[in-house]
């Protein structure tokens, strides 16, 4: 196992950097992965991805988020639970993890619903702070329709059986995970419904859609170095798939209102505009249906976004900076 980050030697630096004669050393940041609905931390696909991330950027510590002590309870927690509590459990787990807690920053990779949950981690906690956040097929603007369960997936069926109650009831909102990112809009205005704004236990808050905005959420998002959102071109699981790009879709006409045209962006409720203005908001597509991930795609993502960074100690001004392979820096 690698030593805690604060034990890494500070090497002297030869390349051109700020005029304050800094010193630096290169580190590979840990990678935190949050899996999707119906998956579990020990699933083969995930362990393969973790190994592949380590091979691509040697020295990467990969931490797969878990909400249960065994794979089965971790899977159950993707369907059942109160997201407020789930997010705070993950915040506590990362903040107290022996190695992660000593890292200057981490990178984060979210699959499907894990993507918006990692964004929630950034907004609410962000200790250790996330440098680059990459999400695949996530539901950043929520879902307009629930997914179907597999024919023998009894845990899934049991979870959705809760919908015999109203989506907006406290009973459902505190128990069914996808209900907490379900989003409804008014048929004529396209504005979020009153029920959603009042009762959504997760999304309405995380997207700062209520009247009172939480400035911490926006500051934390704006502080990211990069937020990369991948959309699967033939995604039929997520409705609408453009939620992966934080877009709004008219359910009747199918017209897409891109994020940059939406009030959430123009009024910068979430810091996305600030992030975009420094070049950190990236929209990507990839072919195939929901979660079709090729090795080639993953390798490119690992190289482009999770590669080594230079830790730069800027001596004057008492600032610590993290510099990537380009000139972009992130203040710690
Ligand atoms: C905003 O979010 C932060 C982080 O979760 C929290 O500590 C703070 O209480 C929230 N502020 C308001 C006004 O709700
Ligand atoms: C979820 O848990 C939080 C924290 O305990 C609580 O404040 C909130 O009311 C719960 N949500 C629902 C819908 O019950
Ligand atoms: C969808 O588009 C139609 C046609 O332009 C419009 O009448 C309707 O109000 C729109 N609905 C929403 C929810 O924006
Ligand atoms: C989004 O904004 C751009 C630039 O202001 C504009 O050209 C475009 O028509 C808008 N798109 C939609 C769907 O409103």
Image (spheres, helix red, strand yellow):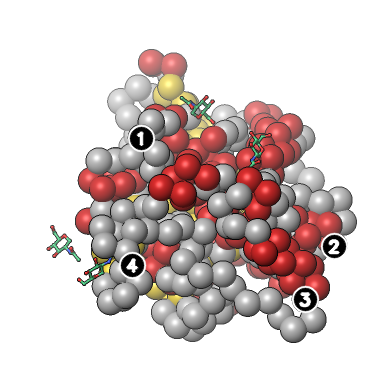
Closer to the chain start, of discs 4 and 2, is 2
Q: Gap between marks 4 and 2, in whole Å?
A: 35 Å
| Residue 153 image label | 3
Q: Considering only vertical position in the picture, is 237 above or below 166?
A: below
Q: Residue furthest right?
A: 70
Q: Please tell me which residue is depicted at 56% across the width and 52% down the height of the picture.
A: 168
Q: In terms of depth relative to the viewer, which is nearer, 114 or 277? A: 114
Q: Quadrant of ligand 2?
A: top right
* Element marked by disc 4: strand
* Element marked by disc 1: loop
Q: Gap between marks 1 and 3, in whole Å?
A: 39 Å
x, y (%) of residue 167? 58, 57
Q: Gap between marks 4 and 3, in whole Å?
A: 30 Å
Q: Residues within 10 Å of mark 4 (few under 14, many from 20)?
A: many
Q: Gap between marks 2 and 1, in whole Å?
A: 39 Å
Look at discs 1 and 4 and give the one toward the viewer. Answer: 1
Closer to the chain start, of discs 1 and 3, is 3
Q: Residues within 10 Å of mark 2 (few under 14, many from 20)?
A: some
- The residue singled out by tag 2 in the image is 72
Q: In terms of depth relative to the viewer, which is nearer, 211 or 92? A: 211
- Left or right of residue 291, residue 273 in this image: left
Q: Residue furthest top?
A: 317
Q: In terms of depth relative to the viewer, which is nearer, 322 or 293? A: 293
| Residue 211 image label | 1
- The residue singled out by tag 4 in the image is 249
* Element marked by disc 3: loop
């Amino acid at each position: 196992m690698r030593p805690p980050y604060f034990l890494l030697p500070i090497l002297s630096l030869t390349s051109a950097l700020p005029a304050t004669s800094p010193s630096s050393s290169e580190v590979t940041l840990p990678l935190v992965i949050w899996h999707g609905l119906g998956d579990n931390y020990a699933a083969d696909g995930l362990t393969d991805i973790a190994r592949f991330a380590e091979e691509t950027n040697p020295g990467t510590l990969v931490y797969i988020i878990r909400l249960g002590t065994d794979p089965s309870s971790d899977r159950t927690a993707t369907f059942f639970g109160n997201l407020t509590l789930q997010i705070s459990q993950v915040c506590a787990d990362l903040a107290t993890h022996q190695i992660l807690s000593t890292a200057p920053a981490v990178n984060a990779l979210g699959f499907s619903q894990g993507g918006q949950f990692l964004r929630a981690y950034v907004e609410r906690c962000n200790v250790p702070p996330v440098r680059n956040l990459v999400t695949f097929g996530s539901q950043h603007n929520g879902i307009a329709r629930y997914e179907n369960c597999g024919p023998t997936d009894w845990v899934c069926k049991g979870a959705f059986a809760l919908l015999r109650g109203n989506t907006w009831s406290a009973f459902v909102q505190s128990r069914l995970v996808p209900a907490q990112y379900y989003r409804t809009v008014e048929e004529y205005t396209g504005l979020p419904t009153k029920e959603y704004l009042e009762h959504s236990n997760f999304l309405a808050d995380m997207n700062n859609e209520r009247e009172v905005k939480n400035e911490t959420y926006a500051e934390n998002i704006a502080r990211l170095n990069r937020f990369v959102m991948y959309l699967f071109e033939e995604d039929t699981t997520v409705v609408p798939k453009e939620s992966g790009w934080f877009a709004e879709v008219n359910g009747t006409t199918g017209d897409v209102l891109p994020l940059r045209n939406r009030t959430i962006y123009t009024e910068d409720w979430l810091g996305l505009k600030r992030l975009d203005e420094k070049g950190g908001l990236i929209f990507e597509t990839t072919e195939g249906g929901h979660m079709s991930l090729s090795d080639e795609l993953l390798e490119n993502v690992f190289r482009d976004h999770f590669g080594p960074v230079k830790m730069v100690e800027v001596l004057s001004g008492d600032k610590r900076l993290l510099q990537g392979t380009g000139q972009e820096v992130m203040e710690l």
